[in-house]
Amino acid sequence: MARELCTGDPVNFVTARNAAAARARESGDTGLAERIKKLRKPTTAAWAVNLLADREPDELGALLDLGDRLRHAQRELRGDELRDLAAERTRVLDRLTTRAAELAVEGGHGIADSGREQITQTLTAALSDPEAAAEVQRATLTKPLEYSGFGLDDLAVAAIQRQAARPRPARKSEESGEGKVLELRNRLRDSEKHLDVAAAELTRAETACREAEEHHERLREELADAEAELRVRRRDVKTARQEHERAVKAKDAAARALGED
């Protein structure tokens, strides 16, 4: 049920969810009804990834297989293979991100640039973390995933740097260029500090943006729930009003009949 709801049209999510919960309640399964009622509507990016998992399982499987090969190469510290696999990963992520966006468009909803970034981010998490991969394969995401551990890029760089750090024969020019090397190292260190500051600021800005988007989605869903509840209450009022009018007419008719007697 969750998979069906999370891969259906987001516009109809609240209505479909409430209907499914009502059916479960009518059948006597109140526990299932409550679980269904708690389901949140997927963001557009999460919905696109759900479509990819549901309709292109082989493509997603290829991505996860690539993740296994990357982890194996990292454990073996095979720098050359890691470089090749990292390039393949970039190509596969680009292809699957594009395919997920195409599926969303086919389903009637376009994907903004920020949404494409969230799709890539989610697929990267699936590639890097087996638990995230299992979550993506279920096609029941309600929001994009993140991977907070050490990325495969970091592992690849470490292996490549280790391979490149093998001792090399010293050259005479090295001593004369010692001052230049020291200067370059200092410049590199300063650049790395600036990069760390910029990266931290970017992370804070991205986190704030995601939180705002999620809050916006929650408010939209709450509004949709409130509107659905209002429609039900209006129908109840209309029915009660009609019943009241019938009762008044019946009373008047009885009073007239009594007067005639």
Image: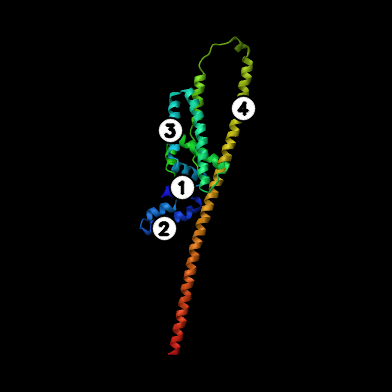
To which residue does mark 1 refer? 7
Residue type indicated by callout 1? Thr
Mark 2 secondary-structure assignment: helix
Task: Note whether 18 is above or below 148 in the view shown.
Answer: below
Query: Is the image coloured rainbow, by chain, by secondary structure, or in one colour?
Result: rainbow
Mark with earlier residue (3, 4): 3
To which residue does mark 4 refer? 191
Question: Badge 2: how crowded within 10 Å, few (<14), some, or many (20+)?
Answer: some
Cα gap from disc 3 to disc 4, whole angstroms: 36 Å
Which residue is at the far top? 172
Are the residues tagged 2 and 4 within 8 Å (C-beta)?
A: no
137 sits left or right of 186 in the view: left
Cα gap from disc 1 to disc 3, whole angstroms: 24 Å
> Which is more foreground, mark 3 or mark 4?
3
Mark with earlier residue (3, 2): 2
Question: Which residue is depicted at the point 50% across and 59% down?
Answer: 228
> Which is more foreground, mark 3 or mark 2?
3
> Which is more foreground, mark 4 or mark 1?
1
Question: Which residue is depicted at the point 46% across and 23% down?
Answer: 78
Mark with earlier residue (2, 4): 2
Which residue is at the far front? 106
Residue type indicated by callout 2? Ala
Are the residues tagged 1 and 2 within 8 Å (C-beta)?
A: no
To which residue does mark 3 refer? 65
Mark 1 secondary-structure assignment: helix
Which residue is at the far left? 28
**Residue 72 can be seen, yes or no:** yes
Mark with earlier residue (1, 2): 1
Cα gap from disc 1 to disc 2, whole angstroms: 20 Å
